[in-house]
Amino acid sequence: MSGILKKTKVMEVFNAGYELKFYEDFNAEGKILNFLEVSMPFGDRIILDGENMEELEKKLRRILPVALQSRRIAENDCYALPA
């Protein structure tokens, strides 16, 4: 991920900790761009952008539990026998 790493933090979801990485970058006009990256256990990651770090964390609190659950369901479906 490009940009300057500004902060890291751990978010607890389903009794597991996920490392959040907050980045800051600038667009061509010099406007600050904020990004958040979290690595997930299935070799996947979520990247969000937003106005500030607080907004990014708030978005992730809604998205991460759903994303983890959907990936667990998809992983279980991969091993299901065809009907």
Image (cartoon, rainbow, N blue to C red):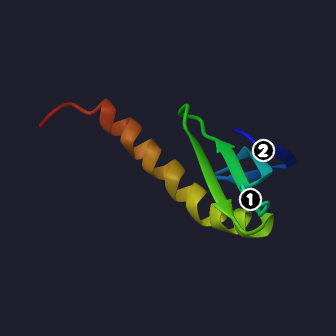
Q: Nearer the viewer, residue 16 or 35?
A: 35
Q: Regarding mark 1 in the picture, which secondary structure is present there?
A: strand
**Percent position of residue 59, x then y:** 64, 66
**For the residue carrying disc 2, how many other residues have a C-alpha within 10 Å: few (<14), some (14-19), or many (20+)?**
few
In the image, residue 12 sits, relative to residue 80, either above or below, namely below
Q: Which residue is mark 1?
A: 33
First-in-chain label (2 vs 1): 2
Q: Amino acid at mark 1?
A: Leu
In the picture provided, is 76 more to the left or to the right than 21? left
**Which of the image's four quarters has the C terminus?**
top left
Q: Residue furthest right?
A: 6
**For the residue carrying disc 1, how many other residues have a C-alpha within 10 Å: few (<14), some (14-19), or many (20+)?**
some
**Percent position of residue 71, x then y:** 45, 44
Report the residue at 48% width, 51% height from top: 69
Q: Which residue is mark 2?
A: 3
Report the residue at 70% width, 68% height from top: 58
**Which of the image's four quarters has the N terminus?**
top right
In the image, residue 20 sits, relative to residue 62, either above or below, namely above
In the picture provided, is 79 more to the left or to the right than 43? left
Q: Nearer the viewer, residue 29 or 81?
A: 29
